Image (cartoon, grey):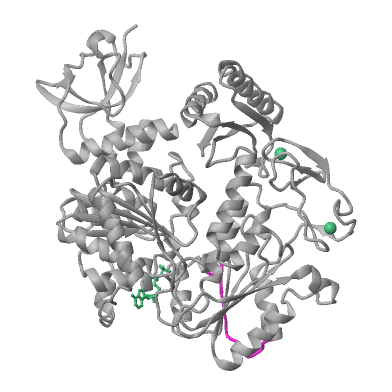
Amino acid sequence: MPLYADIIVNITASALDRTFQYLVPEEMKASVRPGCRVDIPFGARTVSGYVVGLGCVPLIDPARIKPILGFAPKGIALEDRAMELAAWMRERYGCTMNQALLTVLPAKKAVRKGKTKVASPAAEEPALIPPVALNEGQQLAVSAIEEEMAGQNRPVLLHGITGSGKTEVYMAVMEKVMAAGKQVILLIPEISLTYQNVRRFTGRFGARIGLIHSRQSQGEKYETVEKARKGELSLVIGPRSALFTPFPDLGLIVIDEEHDESYFSETAPRYHSTEVARKLAQLTGAGLILGSATPSLDSYFKAKSGAFRLVTLENRAVQNSHLPRVEVVDLRREMKEGNKSIFSRSLQSKMEERLARKEQIILFLNRRGFAGFVSCRSCGKPLVCPHCDVSLTLHRGAQLKCHYCGYQIPAPETCPSCGSPYIAAFGTGTQKVEGLIGKMFPGAKVLRMDADTTKGKEGHSRILSVFARGGADILLGTQMIVKGHDFPRVSLVGILAADISLYREDYRAAEQTFALLTQAAGRAGRGEIPGEVVIQTYQPDHYAVETASRQDYEAFYREEIERRGLLHYPPAGGMLEVLVSGRDEKENIAFTESLAASVRKHFAEQDAVVIGPAAPFRNKVQDIYRQSLIIKHPDRELLLKIAALIREEGKSRVQSDLY
Ligand code: ADP
Ligand code: ZN
Ligand code: ZN
């Protein structure tokens, strides 16, 4: 059977819909792949192009389709690199070559001259204090990183407690990379892309910095990308898309707050930035630093196994600054003793003290994963699946269901653990809390930061800078306030409901809770005023809450990795999560069952565990029904093959994530 290749001759995003079909000669059939560079006859000339797709259906009269001449030698390094990365993403994330290329290639769009202005923070601000001298721990970290980069060049996991001065370490390494004439990409979560943070870099490296962020126009982005391509920039800072900056001689990639969920792409290709960064570092020989106070379990697991190099910072950087004192308050006891307010007595009195002393307070309302879970207000226990250890969620018809395995029970009227009738879905919004603060502390100035108040053009950065300048006493917000911000005058952090994020229908709920609590607590006492933290919770004994209150990552990791192992969850084993959609609910369930059956049949010998179909919490979105399948196996390569089979049979109805 003849095989045809779709080929692009010019790699820019806009050229993607201009592919040309060529015949693959017999001797190339076995080795041709999307991403390959080939020579083709083009008009009267011979040019090089890249294969982006393969198929057996001719789009024009087969007699008029010309054959490929042969494989071309490696071409312009940057283009080859983009192609290779795209081809790898296509395999790894099961997207099309076009989707991968659209992600990897910069959007090409003309900039209307005079219309765009690229913000230059350095110009508007007074000069910074000269750079700080690194302390001993930081110096050791820098030399360990440089040693690794000069040697094996494994990815470095920089694990440093909150406020330990990781940013200074990055900057010291960056400086040397830039001095050698190479360029640097720094990824930070979009939410941390504030004036305050960026200024530290512009202050140090001046004008050779480019910023990429979601509020830019396509034209502004393109201008930055073009400058980078020409080597006019030395550092680009941005969220995950900045990873694809086409630097000619990339020397270093830094991913700050590497555990952050914004590094997972939600649209196809559903890639994970750390993985892509690893691949890119491999292709370019660049170094890779992943930094966090609360590394993802996956990265720490790799560091323990030697795949990553572990470098640690154990102390706070500012002299006389120490980790805050943490008090855990049991909300069950508060209720028993007659306090039904959402502020425990201890938090109330500590807030009064701070307000009187004109120190600042952060109140963190944990709202993550706030969806349908049910817990007991008397004993604090959530209702969880006995098989999967994730929380059950309340569906219509008062059924509690497990999103992983489909286990289901009618919602009980009393708590199965303690018999209390106070069992319900839990919830308070930030607005309501703001009202309560107003009543309780009438003199206090409160800034609220949540999805509603950050919608505008300036969004969160305006709120954060007002607070940083001392324009309010209390900053009240959701998880967006915990990320990497540095407020030296904050001496009290109150966490209103620590355990809510434990109830997510996700095997990573404890990991995310530990990270949120540790990061939130880490906002206190970053300057010289000692910090204090109050963690309010219904589950003071839960290991995620307990270890976070001690900021003890190691202890959390040990407990969590053991639990994951028992239930065959990653990182020890691989897990493939598949979401199947359809317009007809019954048909969709049957279709998902047929996919499961097909996997069982084709992979019977490999013992892959197929769980489901089951209904996810949002099992109906815009009239489309959804079912999920979970497949576990220690070998991720095998899971990739299973994913390919499912895609082949399920086409655009399936979406899969491999963990
Ligand atoms: P992290 O990113 O680890 O949370 P940062 O890099 O933001 O920590 O540093 C926390 C604070 O400590 C910042 O205000 C920073 O300016 C300060 N800092 C960092 N290193 C030093 C140092 N060697 N000496 C004095 N202050 C430092
Ligand atoms: Zn109970
Ligand atoms: Zn289950």
Query: From this viewpoint, is residue 507 visible?
Result: no
Query: From this viewpoint, is residue 479 visible?
Result: yes
In the rendered image, the residue lying farthest to the bottom is 356
In this rendering, the answer to whether 347 lies above or below 251 is below
Residue 214, picture quadrant: bottom left
| Image location (x, y in percent) of residue 346 | 71, 81
> Which span is picked out in magenta?
441-453
Q: Residue at x 27, y 83 (%)?
A: 126
Query: In which of the image's four quarters is ligand 2 placed?
Result: bottom right
| Image location (x, y in percent) of residue 527 | 45, 81
Q: Residue at x 27, y 30 (%)?
A: 18
* Left or right of residue 485, residue 244 in this image: left
Q: Residue at x 51, y 73 (%)?
A: 523
In this rendering, the answer to whether 363 lies above or below 618 is below
In this rendering, the answer to whether 492 lies above or below 374 is below
| Image location (x, y in percent) of residue 11 | 23, 36
Asked whether 385 falls inside the magenta stretch, the response is no
| Image location (x, y in percent) of residue 194 | 39, 69
Residue 397, picture quadrant: top right
Q: Nearer the viewer, residue 241 or 185?
A: 185
> How many discs mark residues in the rendered view?
0
Q: Main secondary structure of the magenta part?
A: loop
Instruction: Indicate the quadrant containing the N terminus: top left, top right, bottom left or bottom right.
Output: top left
Q: Nearer the viewer, residue 650 or 341?
A: 341
In this rendering, the answer to whether 30 lies above or below 18 is above
* Left or right of residue 378, residue 76 in this image: left
